[in-house]
Amino acid sequence: MQYQQEAKEQWWEQKCEEIEELDKQGKQDQMYKAINDLIRKKSRGSIKDESGKLLNDPELVRNRWKEYIERLYNTEDKPCSLDIEPATDKDDIRPCILEEEVATAIKELKNNKAEGIVEIPTEMLKCMGNTCTTLKVFHTAVSTNL
């Protein structure tokens, strides 16, 4: 027991000397990291059971995780299949593009870039000015699947 105490004190002395040396060298970031490594509590793989009792034994911890996962993925209370009807033509409604979204998107476009699949240059979009007209162009492009 005496040997363990001496070894522990020697270990602490060594760590303190290392920290002091880092401080003398002006390596504050490494010094604070070394201090945090010493004082930070490390997790030992424990977990609480359903009643709140702390479990430390690796086998009990494994069993608790198994119980938790089984309960999490329990299929008794969940539907086994989704009843999704196929989409019809009436359901083919496209999202509405807002005028503010178009104005912001055009404003953020960079000049002198290659056109997209619609082949409208960025500069032309910026010169159009009226976002309402531009919005009509986009709605037409979306509705015709361009």
Image (tube, grey):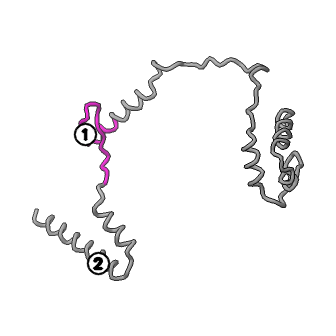
Question: Residue at (36%, 67%) from the top-left corner?
Answer: 33
Badge 2 amino acid: Glu
Badge 1 amino acid: Leu
Residue that carries the numbered disc 1 in the rendered image = 54
Q: In this view, does 125 lie above or below 52?
A: below
Along the viewing direction, whichever of 133 and 94 lies nearer the viewer: 133
Residue that carries the numbered disc 2 in the rendered image = 20
Q: Is residue 36 above or below residue 125?
A: below
Across and down, in percent, residue 86 comes to: 72, 19
For numbered disc 1, what is the local secondary structure?
strand
Question: Residue at (36%, 30%) from the top-left corner?
Answer: 67
- Whichever of labels 2 and 1 marks the residue nearer the N terminus, that label is 2
Q: Residue 93 lies in what quarter of the image?
A: top right
Image position of 100 (left or right of 77): right
* Total count of labels: 2
Across and down, in percent, residue 49 comes to: 28, 34
For numbered disc 2, what is the local secondary structure?
helix
Along the viewing direction, whichever of 136 and 109 lies nearer the viewer: 136
Q: Indicate whether residue 2 is drawn in magenta.
A: no
Q: Are marks 2 and 1 in contact (CB under 8 Å)?
A: no
Q: In this view, does 15 lie above or below 98?
A: below
Image position of 121 (left or right of 1): right
Along the viewing direction, whichever of 97 and 113 lies nearer the viewer: 97
